[in-house]
Amino acid sequence: ILDLAPFCSLNCKGETRVLYSLYGIVEHSGTMRSGHYTAYIKSRPSTHNYVENGLDAGHKISHAEASKGSWFHISDSSVHPVPEAKVQSSQAYLLFYEKIS
């Protein structure tokens, strides 16, 4: 969970917390000339409040909801579950967050 409130412009200074939850990482291995991209993706248990491709536009998720779920490592056509510690130690190239509050 990342809180961006201390770094916000005047438009959101009234908010005490501006929270984002990490849900995806792209990782590159190799050199500048060649290599391979893989991804780590977090899936949450589905509930009736979620639509097929993510969150319902009107539904804000809580900190507790954002922390639930499982991480997967994706490389070409293989998908494997991984512990969160593996994700935290990855060499992130791109990070994907969703706003949770």
Image (tube, rainbow, N blue to C red):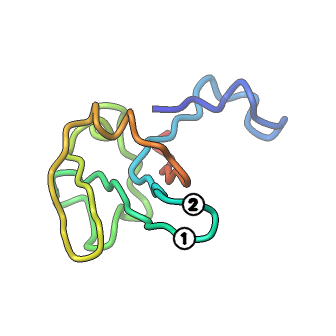
Return the residue found at the far right.
10
- Name the quarter where the N terminus is drawn: top left
State yes or no: discs 2 and 1 in contact (Cβ < 8 Å).
Answer: yes
- Residue 37 lies left or right of residue 67; in this view the side is right
Give how far apart the Cα atoms at labels 2 and 1 are: 5 Å
- Residue 12 lies left or right of residue 66; in this view the side is right
**Crowdedness of circle 1 by 10 Å Cα count: few (<14), some, many (20+)?**
few
| Residue 7 higher or lower than 58, as above or below | above
> What's the residue type where badge 1 is placed?
Ser
| Residue 58 higher or lower than 65, as above or below | below
- Residue 99 lies left or right of residue 23; in this view the side is right
> What's the residue type where badge 2 is placed?
Thr
Residue receiving disc 1? 34
| Residue 60 higher or lower than 5, as above or below | below
Q: Residue at x 50, y 47 (%)?
A: 92
**Crowdedness of circle 2 by 10 Å Cα count: few (<14), some, many (20+)?**
few
Based on the displayed image, in which of its 4 quarters is residue 31 positioned? bottom right
Q: Residue at x 26, y 56 (%)?
A: 73
Q: Position of residue 29 (x, y in %)?
A: 46, 57
Residue receiving disc 2? 31
Q: Nearer the viewer, residue 36 or 47?
A: 36
Q: Position of residue 18 (x, y in %)?
A: 59, 34
Q: Position of residue 60 (x, y in %)?
A: 41, 48
Q: Residue at x 24, y 48 (%)?
A: 71
Q: Nearer the viewer, residue 29 or 70?
A: 29
Secondary element under disc 2, as helix, strand or loop, is: loop
Secondary element under disc 1, as helix, strand or loop, is: loop
Based on the displayed image, in which of its 4 quarters is residue 38 positioned? bottom left
- Residue 14 lies left or right of residue 17; in this view the side is right
